[in-house]
Image (cartoon, helix red, strand yellow):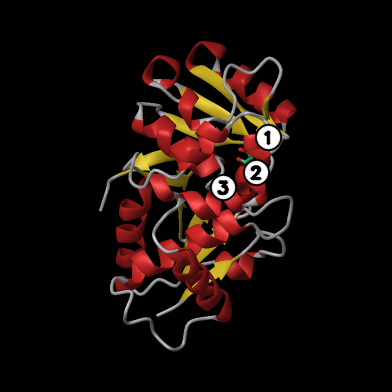
Amino acid sequence: MTIDVAFTPAGLGKDEVAGRAVFVIDILRATTVVCAALHHGAKGVIPVGSVEDAIKMAQVLGPAQVVLAGERQGLPIAGFGLGNSPLEMVPPAVDGKTIVMTTTNGTGALLATSGAAAVYLAAAVNLTVAGAQLRQAVAAGLPVVIVCAGREGRFGIDDAYAAGRLALEGLGDPRRVPGDLPDATVAAIDLARRYGSSWRRPLRQSAAGRHLKALGMAGDVDRSAEQDRYPVLPQFVDRRVVAAPVP
Ligand code: MLT
């Protein structure tokens, strides 16, 4: 069995993802936001790399069905209908809509997975569902890699802790962790054990969490810490993220 962890997408080449089941985590906040949007009826989320690409995509798809969403430096983007807060992803804003999204780290991490056998999005808000899918991938003999978005190419405790929690969830019995896991997975699991089961502490202590608090968005951090609040399985397929059947 292989469950590997990449603490950032930097250096993630085709060989690291080819033929693997990839689980992307940007708990603060992109993957949490996508879960909230799909849970509340969004048809899909299209991740793009830049503000310009988002505007072009909305023009191609037709503005009536599309909502632009995202952030730069954590703040909403001028002219976009939505920012990057899970609290904004409520049915009146997203139900039946396609969301075109660009964020600083999360959408880039997703776009770095091309060539994977399957790509799913994970966060605390869908931990149980994502863990079940990870177990299914392992049972099918697919190597797994958990990709943390990190922060501007650097390690983030929030995503690394979440990677450890997801790996433990995927392994099933946390008392029986195989001895041959890659070092990065062992480190992520150690971090998960260090903080225990409360999501709030690692999220609030992380640089991303402190940044959001400084912007007056501590509510986003707390919502992102609510385990299984949005029990959906976002899958990135054909350049858009849609809700896959829950395993
Ligand atoms: C990102 O993609 O970098 C994050 O989602 C940032 C944020 O939410 O502020």
Mark 1 Cα-neighbour bin, 10 Å: few <14, some 14–19, many ≥20:
few
Q: Is residue 53 visible?
A: yes
**What is the spatial separation of the Cα atoms under label 1 and label 3, in whole angstroms?**
11 Å
Marks 2,1: beta carbons within 8 A:
yes
Determine if residue 114 is in view.
no
- Nearest the viewer among 195 and 32 is 195
**Horizontal and vertical percent for residue 108?**
65, 46
| Amino acid type at image mark 2 | Arg
Could you tell me which secondary element the residue under label 3 belongs to?
helix
The mark total stands at: 3
Q: Residues within 10 Å of mark 3 (few under 14, many from 20)?
A: many
Cα gap from disc 2 to disc 3, whole angstroms: 6 Å
Mark identifier at residue 204: 3
Identify the residue at horizontal 69%, vertical 51% (top origin): 151
Along the horizontal axis of the image, is 205 left or right of 123? Answer: right
Quarter of the image for the N terminus: give it.
bottom left
| Residue type pointed to by label 1 | Ala
Name the side, left or right, on which 2 lies relative to 239.
left
Query: Which of the two labelled residues, at mark 1 and mark 3, occupies the earlier sequence position?
Result: 3
- Compared across the picture, whether 178 is left or right of 189 comes to left
**What residue is rendered at 60% in x and 20% in y?**
58
Which residue is under mark 1? 214
Callout 2–callout 3 Cβ contact below 8 Å: yes
Q: Which residue is drawn at the image coordinates 44% and 72% (left, top)? A: 143
Q: Which residue is mark 2?
A: 210
The residue lying furthest to the bottom in this view is 179
Of residues 56 and 198, the one nearer the viewer is 198
